[in-house]
Image: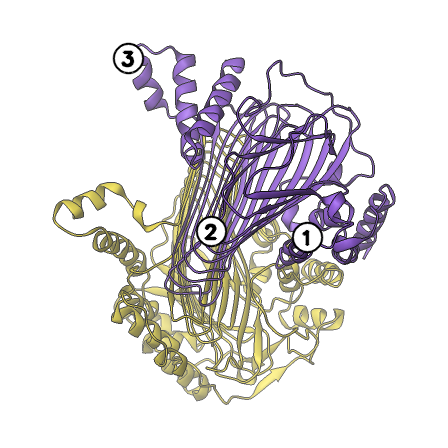
Amino acid sequence: MALAQAKQTATEERLASMSLPEMCGCTRAAREDALVRVREMGLPGRRDEYWKYTRPDTLISAEAPHAVVFDAGEPLIFEDMDNLKIVFVDGVFSPEESDDLTLEGVTIDRIEDICHKDIHWAKELYGKLEARGQVPVQRPLAALNTAYAKDGVAIHVSGKPSKPICLMYRHASEASDAMLHHIVRVEPGAEVTVLEIGPAASRFNKCMEIDIADNGTLHHVRAQGRDHERRAVTHMFTRLGEESTYKSFTLTANGVLTRNEQVVELTGDNAVAHVAGACVGDGDFHHDDTVFITHDAVNCESRQVFKKVLRNGATGVFQGKILVKEGAQKTDGYQISQSLLLDDDSQFLAKPELEIYADDVACSHGSTSGAIDETALFYLRSRGVPHKDATNMLTLAFLAEAVDEIEDKELAEEIVTRLEGWLARRS
Amino acid sequence: MAALDQTQVKEGVDQETVDAVREVGTYKYGWDTDIEMEYAPKGVNPDIVRLISEKNEEPEWMTEWRLSAFERWTKMDEPSWAMVNYPEIDFQDQYYYARPKSMEEKPKSLDEVDPKLLATYEKLGIPLKEQMILAGVEGAEDMPAEGRKVAVDAVFDSVSVGTTFKDELAKHGVIFCSISEAIKDHPELVKKYLGTVVPVSDNFYATLNSAVFSDGSFVYIPPGVRCPMELSTYFRINAENTGQFERTLIIADKGSYVSYLEGCTAPQRDTAQLHAAVVEIIVEEDAEVKYSTVQNWFPGDEEGKGGIYNFVTKRADCRGDRSKVMWTQVETGSAVTWKYPSCILRGDESQGEFYSIAITNNYQQADTGTKMVHLGKNTKSRIVSKGISAGKAQNTYRGLVSMHPKAKNSRNYTQCDSLLIGDKCGAHTVPYIEVKNNSSRVEHEATTSKVDDDQLFYCRQRGMDEEEAVALVVNGFCKDVLQALPMEFAMEAQQLVAISLEGSVG
């Protein structure tokens, strides 16, 4: 009882520290519902099973811990590439830095603006997938986001836009505490690439709801910024229709605490969902990938590929689940989580789960952890490769399976370049 | 077995497998023995705890130990994390102590033994020679043993009916008796080891067991002794509305070896019955313990009525260097199984192994697995778990592999496979993996494509396709495990041998 009381107090303290946005338009009902959900569930605590390996304290505290703004001395990844930039500074839309939001095949609105309109599709989506994603596991921080996020974009994809849409998150203030909520609707047969880059804020809570209609395709590539002290909790809720495709890749380098949740629901037959992540952590670094994939249609394919390279006391967490519902026959589910521990101080904590209620399925998962393969290292060194280079080569090779999940070769190359940079700075 | 008969079996699943599962689903031990019983009043409270202690003629310290456990238990909550659903258990609506009236005084000759007790053991398929001893006949040890010797401790509801081959074992210094006798005759050993592997406050059911355990087995193997025969305990629940709470304590001193078997059955009843046991194993330097179980409690009927709720805490502590423990379990019974035989690998180079086959049918639910806690250097563990689910059953593997920072150069290999027969059942895998040093290697596999590559390569070289090759390799491995199970277990175990992994999921 005392525990429930403590949780309630912490939740109310957090809610009191924020102000609700103007309750109006098509998001009003969703926000009100979400607020009720948050109060019912309470914000996550240390004793919650779903937060067994990651301490949520600093993510729910009334005040965000400060984080020094880091100057990497180089532009953000993908910044110089041709894409439609939508820039947020400490979680606030910056019209000056952003490109013109018009692009053929896509309509982009700010969440703040749609509040004053009654956009049919947005009403159907805002807070809806998040609410669905609360069962069977509660995700109170996402509900908190639905209720309180003041900014974000609503992207409506009706064709095949010529260039990616790039959500760029800049970090400017040490005390920033940002919350963004995006919604994306991909119409039948439409295709889009969404990029997310940058550290965003000292503390960042982001929620994205993606609804992909039949035959639609969405590619998502994200790089979470190099600021050492930043904290982030992100949720991506994706629903897939018939023969649709969703492919997501996340690169995380540094950041004192990151929790990325992916909640994917395959509701149409023959849909394909791939989620992948590569993370490299050095020192005070805690990275948590939590994935929940639900198969609720016939002949769908899902893949989870997560690789973590850890050193100097860094911690990597993976919680993955494949849920195959009754009747979701011919499901092909694959899940792999691996960590490469470069020294004895780092740790890898994993909970790769399967829950299967259909008999004609092929689901498999694997999870490994260990050091660099001495035999491979010896092989390279015996051929004249210096120790340092050999270690870096093997580390990159280890991460390759995850990076290969990015379909666009140009984007993948950029990711590899950044990974090489990370390794070079540390060897 | 109507549920299974009507099920459309997926192509690729062997008929043999289906038949084997169907066979297992027909419960052969569902009859009961009509015997006059003596009960303690229903419910649990400090008076009942004292009464059980009194019935077992226990010393004061033991009574106190039980009472403090009861005190803790009243403050604990029933765990709810397992993937099992059952109606709330009314812990006050159970008998915590029941024994046959005829056991009040130990019978001296065959004529004195209650014929009903005798018939019970005959029906359970235990050989005559054993039967005489099991029924508590003194002097039966002198008769020539037929076939292989297996010493048996038989527990009927709350009391141990008899222990065989005690004298022969004593010649080797081995102590094998019921735990109630051990508390009286070897208090120093019991005091030293009881509750050191599974602490009183370990979990809800273990704490309840600590308070109300009525009987169970006690084994002590002295240093350097290889136990001359297999030891076995046979648990039988007979009385209605009665919970069985047994406690087993096995101590393998330095350099010793013992193989221990456990079997269990219960009559078919409409109401569910509770079974909450605790098994503690202490393995000292260079010692080795093999613990095998065929759990065959009544699983409930086709509609899911009745059956045993099996909440068991089993744990082995490999205290000494190079110590070794091996758990083998074949879980076919119980309406609800909640069981995680675990290994604490404390000693350097100690080894833990867990082999499990869990079969669920109709409305059975099994949530079972293991914990491998690596604390010492160069420790090794291996987990092989096969879950087979049919009817409307749910089968979950739940496990933990933990490599502590000091467990350098340790190794774990885990493989869990599940097979579903029919589209109304479920198979789940919930492994926890915690690695806190980089010289250890942990591999968790749930794919059938990566069983021993060399053997696979050999088979494929000879023209088998991959699936055939995998099935052959895994089947061969299964057989090894199953054939290691002796005695009365062999019958049930043989039925499972035919199980193939074709069409399996991770």
Residue A226 location, x and y as percent? Answer: 62, 23
Q: Which of marks 2 and 1 is nearer the N terminus?
A: 1
* Residue B342 appears in the picture as rendered: no
Q: Which chain is purple?
A: A
Percent of width and height locating residue A97:
69, 25
Q: How far apart are marks 2 and 3 (CA)?
A: 51 Å
**Which disc is residue A383 wearing?**
3
Above or below — where is A166 with respect to B79? above
**Foreground: disc 2 or disc 1:** 2
| B226 relative to A27 in the view: left or right | left
Judging depth in this view, the residue of A405 and A125 nearest the camera is A125
C-alpha separation, residue under disc 2 versus residue under disc 1: 22 Å
Q: Name the residue under label 2.
A: A189
Sequence-first tag of 2 and 3: 2
Q: Colour of chain B?
A: yellow
Residue placed at 44% from the left, 27% from the top?
A410
Q: Earlier in the sequence, mark 3 or mark 1?
A: 1
Res B420 quadrant in image: bottom left
Q: Which amino acid does label 2 sit on?
A: Gly
User: Which three-letter amino acid code belongs to the residue tagged 3?
Assistant: Arg
Q: How much space separates mark 3 and mark 1, taking CA atoms?
A: 57 Å
In the image, B485: left or right of A173?
Answer: left
How many other residues sit within 10 Å of disc 3, few (<14), some (14-19) or many (≥20)? few
Compared with B257, B136 (above or below) is below
